[in-house]
C-alpha cells in the first residue's frame, strides 16, 4: 500500500475495461482483531483492532477466459480492496495489462525501500557503541 | 437516577457546538487549519496515545479525532471507539510475533551487550529538560532543512540486521525462565465481545490494559513501584517499531503482508520465585504492549501484568494486585464517561435529596423541641 | 460491468428483514419475498440477509450452491452445532438441533424449512399464541408430520426451543417457539 491508491484504482479500471467482473465474495470494509503473542509467557492476546478491507473477484475476459483474484488490506476502503483483487487476478495470471501493474509494483517497492533506509538510519545513528566507554566494563554481563 | 428531558436546551446545545468550533478556528485570518499528517508527525506521541487508547489502529482517524476534539485525549479516544463500534468484525489475524518487528528503537536495562546491539532510536530519555526556545519562531526553511540533511552522514549498511531476536529468548535458553506450555493456552479473551466477569484470564487483563488510559495505568503501577507491592522489575527489553500484519490470501491461503502497525513492547523481569519446593526457582516476567510509541504505558502495563499475575494466583494484598480494582478502573472511556455524566442534569434526583434533607432537619428539630418540653 | 444478485444488496436485505419482522410478529402470516428479490428463492434471500462471518450454518440437505458459501461468509458446521439450519421439510427429522441453555436460550437453532406450498395444501394447522389474534388456520403441503411431533418435544422446556422459518418458492412464514400448533387435518 505504498503506492498511491488512486493509481491502483485507475489502473485496475483501465485494464479491465470491457471485461466482466463477478463478486465471489462481497467487497467488505470492517475490522480485524490483531492477535499477538506476548513475549513473556507466550500467550496470545488481542492487542487491538485494525481496519480491514477485503474482496474476491472473478474476471471474465472478452475471449471467455476466467481469472480469480483476491485481496485483504489494512484499510477501510473496500473499493481499494476490489481494485487490488483485480490486480491480483491480472498479475497472478499474467493477463493483458499486467505490465502496467509492474510499473506500480516497482514504485511501491521503491517507496518501501526508502522507508527501510529511513529506519536503518535511525538505528545506525543511535547505536550504542559500548567499546568507546573504555576498558573498565570488565564484568561478565555479556549475553550469548 | 432520573434525568430531566431537555426541552428548550436544544438551541443552547447547538450553540455550544458552534462555540466550540469557533474556539477551534478563533485565529481566523492569522491561522491555518491543522492537517492530518501534521498531527501524526509533529504530535507523534499524542497521536500514538490516542491510537492505543481508542483501541483502533487508524492513523488518519486518530488525527481527525484529535483535531475535532481540540486535543482532548479522552474525547479523541472516545471518538475512535465510537467509530469502531459502527464497523463489522471481518476477521482475526493469525498470531503475530514481535520478533518480526521492524525495530526503530531497542534497549535493554538488564544487559549491556545484546545480540544486534542497543539502539536508542528517537527518545526523550536523555533530553535536558530545557525549553528549546529556538523552536519558538521555527521557520519553514529550518523545519525542512532537518529532513533534508537526515542522510548527510549515512554510513554504509554495515551490520544492522532487519529483525532482532528477543532478549528473553536467550534467558529462556539458559534455563532462567519458567517453561512455557504453549499447548495449555486457550483462545484469547475478547473484551469487545464479553464483559469482564471476574475471575478473568490473563489475556483479558492484557487486552484491557493495552487500550487502557495511560495516566490511570501509570498511577496504579507507580503505587506498586513505590512500595505497595513487590515487583522490583528490570526492563529486559523495550522495543518500538513496526510489526507487519500478515493475513492469509483468500484464495491461496499464503500469508501476505496487509499493512504494518507501529507499537511499543516492554518485557520486564521481576523477582525470582519457584512454584513449589521441588521446582527450581526462575525469574518471573511481566509484559506490556500498545499501539503507537508510548513507553510509559508499556512499562506500567508490564508492571501491572506482573502484579496481577501475583494477585490472580495468591490473592491481592494491595490494589495493584487486584484484577477487579485495576481492570475496571483503567479504561479511559469508561472512567471519563462516568465522570462527565455528573454534569448532566440531575434536577429531579437532587430535588428529592433536598426534600429528604428538609424532612430530616424538621424531624431533628421537632425531636429536640419535644425533648425540651 | 459488475453483476451482483439482488439478495446481496443492502437495500434489498433491508426489505427482506422487514418482511421477516412482519412474519415473526404475526405467526401464520406469509410475506412474498420473491417479489423483493428478483425472484430469488426465499431461503437464499433469508440466509443472505441474516448471516455473516460471525455465525454458522448447516446446509443439511445440500440445497445451496458451492458459490453461495463465500458470499454468505458463515462457517460451515455439523447440524448439531448449527445456529442456523437449512433443510427440506418433506423428509423425517434425523437430527437434534441446538435448543439453547436456560441462561442463553438464544443459543438455539433457527431452522429454515423448505416446503412445497405455504398457501395451499392438504395439511391444515391451527395456530394460536403470541402474535395471533385468537387463532388462525394455515394450509401447507410438503411438510412431514414428524417435524410437528419433534417440535413438540423441542419446545417443551420453554424458553429453550427452536424457531422455524417455513419457505416455499416465493413466501415465508414464521413459527416461533412460542406458537401453539394444533393439527386440524393432515394429508402430507
Image (cartoon, coloured by chain):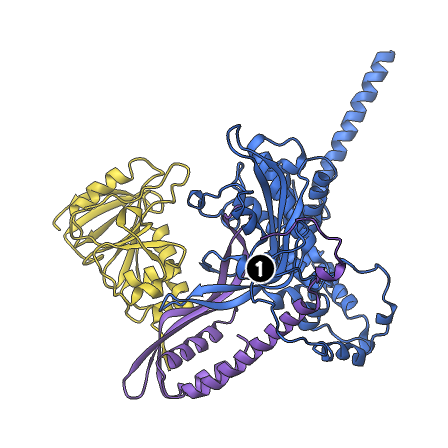
- Identify the residue at horizontal 62%, vertical 72% (top origin): B158
Closest to the observer: A39 or A91?
A: A39
Look at the image and tell me in which quarter the N terminus of chain C lies: bottom left
Q: Is residue B175 above or below residue A93?
A: above
- Identify the residue at horizontal 46%, vertical 73% (top origin): A81
- How many numbered marks, from 0 up? 1
With B100 as the anchor, is B48 left or right in this view? right
With A85 as the anchor, is C153 left or right in this view? left
With B13 as the anchor, is C106 left or right in this view? left
**Displayed quadrant of residue B292:** bottom right
Estimate the x, y position of residue B180 in percent, counting from the top left.
48, 44
- Identify the residue at horizontal 34%, vertical 51% (top origin): C26
Q: Which residue is the extreme one toward the left?
A: C187
Quick one: SS at disc 1?
loop
Q: Is residue B70 above or below residue B331?
A: below
Q: Is residue B54 visible?
A: no
Tell me what hue chain C is rendered in.
Answer: yellow
Chain shaded blue: B
Q: Chain of mark 1?
A: B
Closest to the observer: B270 or C71?
A: B270
The residue at which mark 1 appears reads as: B56
**Displayed quadrant of residue B219:** top right
Q: Is residue A90 visible?
A: yes
Tell me what hue chain A is rendered in.
Answer: purple
- Identify the residue at horizontal 62%, vertical 36% (top origin): B322
Closest to the observer: C10 or A13?
A: A13
Estimate the x, y position of residue B63 in percent, counting from the top left.
66, 66
Q: Is residue C110 above or below residue B291?
A: above
Estimate the x, y position of residue A109 in percent, counting from the top left.
53, 79
Amino acid at each position: 500500500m505504498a503506492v498511491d491508491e488512486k493509481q491502483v484504482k485507475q489502473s485496475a479500471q483501465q485494464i479491465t475495461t470491457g471485461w466482466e467482473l463477478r463478486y465471489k465474495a462481497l467487497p467488505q470494509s470492517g475490522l480485524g482483531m490483531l492477535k499477538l503473542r506476548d513475549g513473556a509467557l507466550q500467550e496470545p492476546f488481542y492487542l487491538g483492532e485494525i481496519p480491514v478491507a477485503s474482496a474476491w473477484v472473478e474476471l471474465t475476459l472478452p475471449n471467455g477466459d476466467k481469472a480469480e483474484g483476491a485481496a485483504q488490506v489494512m484499510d477501510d476502503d473496500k473499493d481499494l480492496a476490489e481494485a487490488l483483487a483485480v490486480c491480483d487476478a491480472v498479475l497472478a495470471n499474467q493477463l493483458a495489462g499486467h505490465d502496467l501493474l509492474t510499473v506500480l509494483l516497482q514504485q511501491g517497492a521503491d517507496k518501501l525501500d526508502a522507508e527501510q533506509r529511513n529506519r536503518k538510519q535511525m538505528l545506525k545513528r543511535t547505536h550504542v557503541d559500548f567499546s568507546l566507554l573504555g576498558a573498565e566494563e570488565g564484568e561478565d554481563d555479556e549475553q550469548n | 437516577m432520573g434525568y430531566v428531558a431537555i426541552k428548550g436546551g436544544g438551541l443552547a446545545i447547538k450553540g455550544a457546538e458552534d462555540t466550540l468550533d469557533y474556539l477551534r478556528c478563533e485565529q481566523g485570518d492569522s491561522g491555518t487549519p491543522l492537517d492530518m499528517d501534521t498531527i501524526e508527525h509533529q504530535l507523534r506521541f499524542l497521536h500514538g496515545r490516542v491510537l492505543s487508547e481508542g483501541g483502533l489502529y487508524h492513523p488518519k482517524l486518530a488525527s481527525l479525532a484529535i483535531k475535532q476534539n481540540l486535543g482532548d485525549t479522552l474525547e479523541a479516544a472516545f471518538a475512535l471507539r465510537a467509530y469502531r463500534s459502527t464497523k463489522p468484525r471481518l476477521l482475526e489475524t493469525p498470531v503475530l510475533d514481535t520478533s518480526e518487528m521492524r525495530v526503530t528503537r531497542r534497549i535493554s536495562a538488564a544487559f549491556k551487550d545484546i545480540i544486534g546491539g542497543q539502539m536508542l532510536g528517537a527518545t526523550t530519555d536523555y533530553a535536558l529538560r530545557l525549553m528549546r526556545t529556538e523552536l519558538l519562531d521555527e521557520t519553514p526553511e529550518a523545519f525542512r532543512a532537518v529532513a533534508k540533511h537526515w542522510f548527510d552522514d549515512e554510513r554504509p549498511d554495515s551490520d544492522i540486521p532487519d529483525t532482532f531476536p528477543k532478549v528473553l529468548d536467550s534467558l529462556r535458553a539458559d534455563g532462567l525462565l519458567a517453561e512455557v506450555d504453549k499447548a495449555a493456552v486457550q483462545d484469547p479473551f475478547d473484551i469487545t465481545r464479553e464483559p469482564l466477569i471476574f475471575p478473568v484470564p490473563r489475556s483479558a487483563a492484557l487486552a484491557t490494559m493495552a487500550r487502557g488510559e495511560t495516566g490511570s495505568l501509570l498511577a496504579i503501577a507507580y503505587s506498586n513501584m513505590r512500595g505497595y507491592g513487590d515487583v522490583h522489575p528490570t526492563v529486559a527489553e523495550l522495543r518500538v517499531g513496526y510489526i507487519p500484519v500478515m493475513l492469509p490470501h483468500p484464495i491461496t491461503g499464503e500469508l501476505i503482508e496487509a499493512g504494518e502497525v507501529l507499537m511499543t513492547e516492554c518485557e520486564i523481569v521481576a523477582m525470582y520465585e519457584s512454584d513449589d519446593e521441588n521446582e527450581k526457582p526462575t525469574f518471573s516476567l511481566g509484559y506490556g504492549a500498545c499501539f503507537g510509541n508510548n513507553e510509559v504505558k508499556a512499562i506500567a502495563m508490564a508492571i501491572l501484568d506482573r502484579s496481577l499475575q501475583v494477585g490472580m494466583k495468591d490473592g491481592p494484598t494491595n490494589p495493584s494486585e487486584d484484577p477487579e480494582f485495576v481492570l475496571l478502573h483503567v479504561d479511559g472511556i469508561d472512567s471519563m464517561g462516568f465522570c462527565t455524566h455528573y454534569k448532566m442534569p440531575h434536577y429531579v434526583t437532587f430535588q428529592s435529596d433536598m426534600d429528604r434533607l428538609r424532612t430530616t432537619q424538621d424531624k431533628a428539630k421537632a425531636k429536640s423541641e419535644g425533648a425540651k418540653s | 460491468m459488475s453483476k451482483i444478485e439482488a439478495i446481496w444488496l443492502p437495500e434489498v436485505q433491508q426489505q427482506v428483514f422487514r418482511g421477516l419482522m412482519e412474519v415473526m410478529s404475526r405467526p401464520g402470516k406469509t410475506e412474498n419475498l420473491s417479489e423483493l428479490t428478483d425472484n430469488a428463492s426465499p431461503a437464499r434471500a433469508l440466509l443472505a440477509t441474516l448471516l455473516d462471518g460471525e455465525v454458522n450454518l448447516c446446509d443439511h440437505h445440500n440445497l445451496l450452491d458451492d458459490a453461495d458459501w463465500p458470499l454468505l461468509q458463515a462457517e460451515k458446521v455439523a447440524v448439531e452445532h448449527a445456529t442456523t439450519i437449512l433443510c427440506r421439510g418433506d423428509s423425517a427429522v434425523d437430527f437434534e438441533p441446538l435448543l439453547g441453555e436456560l441462561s442463553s436460550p438464544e443459543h438455539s437453532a433457527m431452522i429454515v424449512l423448505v416446503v412445497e406450498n405455504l398457501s395451499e395444501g392438504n395439511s391444515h394447522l391451527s395456530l394460536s399464541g403470541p402474535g395471533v389474534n385468537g387463532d388462525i388456520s394455515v394450509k401447507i403441503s410438503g411438510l412431514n408430520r414428524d417435524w410437528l411431533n419433534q417440535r413438540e418435544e423441542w419446545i417443551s422446556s420453554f424458553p429453550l426451543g427452536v424457531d422455524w422459518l417455513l419457505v416455499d418458492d416465493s413466501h415465508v412464514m414464521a413459527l416461533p417457539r412460542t406458537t401453539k400448533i394444533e393439527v386440524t387435518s393432515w394429508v402430507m
